[in-house]
Each structure stands twice: as C-alpha cells, then as structure tokens.
Amino acid sequence: MMTMQNPTYPFPGPLSPTTAATTTRSNPNVAFTTPPNYAARLSHLLTLKGFNPLWCPTLVTHPTPHSLKPYLSPPPTLESFSAIAFTSRAAITSLSTAIADFAEPLLSPHGHTFVLAALGKDSELIVHDDSFIAKFCQNPNRIRVLVPPIATPSGLVHALGLGLGRRVLCLVPTVVGLDEPAVVANFVKELEEKGWDPVRVSAYETRWKGRECGKELVEKCERGELGAVVFTSTAEVDGLLKSLREMVGWDWEMVRKTCPDLVVAAHGPVTAAGAESLGVKVDLVSDKFDSFDGVVNALALRFGMV
C-alpha cells in the first residue's frame, strides 16, 4: 500500500492556564484556525519563532476517496483526461487513499504527457513519494508534476496554460455547514476561460466544527491575551464568524473592540480577499505563500521577533 511522506511535528494541543499566563508576556499568543491536516506544521513554525500557538480549528476535513474511484476504475478511465488539479493537501491525500486499492497503474506507459498540478508545499506529497507516481504509470517520464511559481488557484491555471479542449480533473471539497467560498467556482471558471474542460469532483468534505470552535479565542480576547490570529482559508474565517454569532452573539467588530491590538494575518492574497469579503479586515498578508513560512516570518517581523 502506498504511503505518504509527511513531516512529523508535535501535534498542537491546548495550553494549560498556568502555561498561558506565563508565556503571554514574552511570547505572544497566536490563534490559528486551520483544520487538523495543516495544524501541526503551522504550530511548529510558530513555536520556532517564539510564539505561543493556540489552535482553534473551525473546520474539519474528511476524505471521500469513494467519490474518486469512478474516475479511476476500471483503467484506462483516466486516459480521457490530460491533468489532475489539486488545490489542497486534503485532495492529494484522498486520491492517495483511492488509488491504493488498485493493483495496476491507472495509465498505460505510452500516451500524451499527464500533468499532476499542485500548490506549494502540498506538492511534496507527490514529488517525495515515488510510489504515488508509480500508481499512475509504469513510465515515470509520462508524468509531469507541475508546481506553479505563484501558489494560488489562479497561478495554477496560468501554469497549466491553454487547455485546447483537454479535460482536467479538479479535486475539490464539498463544504458542509457553511457557504461555499467563491474560490472553487472561480478556479473552474478560469480553467474554462483558458480552454480547459474542467470536471469537478468532490475529493473530501470540509465541515464546520461547531458553535463552540471559537471558544478559546473569545476567552483570550476577553482577557486581553491574544496577540494575533492567522487564517489560511476563507472557509476558516466563515467558520469562526459563525461560531462567534451563535456562541456569544459577536460580530467581527466586537472582536476588534474587545481586543483592539489584535493582528489579523492571512496566508496569501486569496485568503486575505476572502476574509475582507466577510467583513474581517486583514492587517498582514504574507508575500510568500507557497508555505506557511511566509506568514509566520511576516508575523515575527511585525512583533519584532526576528
């Protein structure tokens, strides 16, 4: 069975009240709202810079590999496509699970170049795992891994180039409990404008974590102990806002009034634009967003912790 190569970090956990009290003065508390598949990595980077990470996930993700198998089985079903586009780490993991059940490669050794397109560090799940490529084709020269220099869905579309009517399998989430952000619809539209024939398939579910997912963030705000919050997707922002409304009746203006020095950081311009569209003013946007290093380094510079 194929294995995915993931960096191993200590998984973030809640701080005890004693720890929080002793670290707030010298180590700013930084809340972040990522789902579990990104949490350990971001927590690790924040800790390395001297921050005190506070994990407040507003979303959970569940892979749905069964929804992918009709496009893979029986081989050579995938031959009608020219590319697979991954817009998240969760999509790659879901496909990995789906193809692990196939005894034979999904593509023949001969044919047109087949593109696997992924963003930033997400691509490491592909390029650092030879078995992933082998599951697609016995001939590795037929597979091209495409990582756009600008790690956004629009950057991915640009890197793919003109579609010329070719089909691309887009592995995207189904959003449950929240409004679907415009990111996926815009991505599909841009592909169509470039002449691609995008086939949208749900690779995983993104679910709201529930009304109390913002509880620790609110408590830190009320005690004046929150230095910053980091968002890595629009859906995370929406999930937090929904929690604030349903749990304590707050809007984002109330967060600002309660914690006026709070720094709101966004991982890249797509997340920043999504947050702003939901009424959350962003103070800091990383200009390097192929990994979380960019937003963490920007925060460190802002807090004088470089």
Image: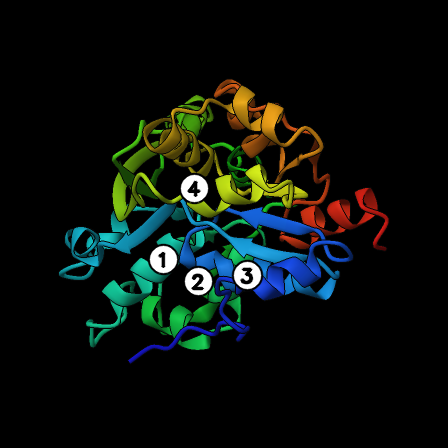
Q: Which residue is mark 4?
A: 214
To which residue does mark 3 refer?
A: 17
| Gap in angstroms between the C-alphas marked 4 and 2 | 47 Å
Q: Give the side of residue 81 with respect to residue 155, left or right.
A: left
Q: Is residue 227 above or below residue 115?
A: above
Q: Secondary structure at mark 1?
A: loop
Q: Amino acid at mark 1?
A: Gly
Q: Considering depth in this image, is 123 or 239 the residue closer to the camera?
A: 239
Quarter of the N terminus within the rendering: bottom left
Whichever of callouts 4 and 1 sits on the residue coming sooner in the sequence is: 1
Q: Earlier in the sequence, mark 4 or mark 3?
A: 3
Asked whether disc 2 touches disc 3, contact meaning CB atoms under 8 Å apart, the reply is no
- Amino acid at circle 2: Arg
Marks 1,2: beta carbons within 8 A? yes
- Label 1 and label 2: CA atoms lie apart by 7 Å
Q: Nearer the viewer, residue 95 or 48?
A: 48
The residue to which callout 2 is attached is 142
Q: Nearer the viewer, mark 4 or mark 2?
A: 4
Task: Choose mark 1 or mark 2, whichever is in front.
Answer: 2
Q: Position of residue 92 (x, y in %)?
A: 38, 58
**Tag 4 secondary structure:** loop
- Say whether disc 2 or disc 3 marks the residue closer to the N-terminus: 3
Residue 166: which numbered mark, if any? Answer: none
The alpha-carbon separation of the residues under discs 4 and 1 comes to 50 Å
Q: Which residue is mark 1?
A: 111
Q: Amino acid at mark 4?
A: Gly
Left or right: 76 in relation to 111: left
Q: Disc 3 versus disc 1: distance between alpha carbons?
A: 60 Å
Percent from the top left, x then y, of residue 6? 49, 72
Tell me if residue 196 can be seen. no
- Chain-order first, disc 1 or disc 2: 1
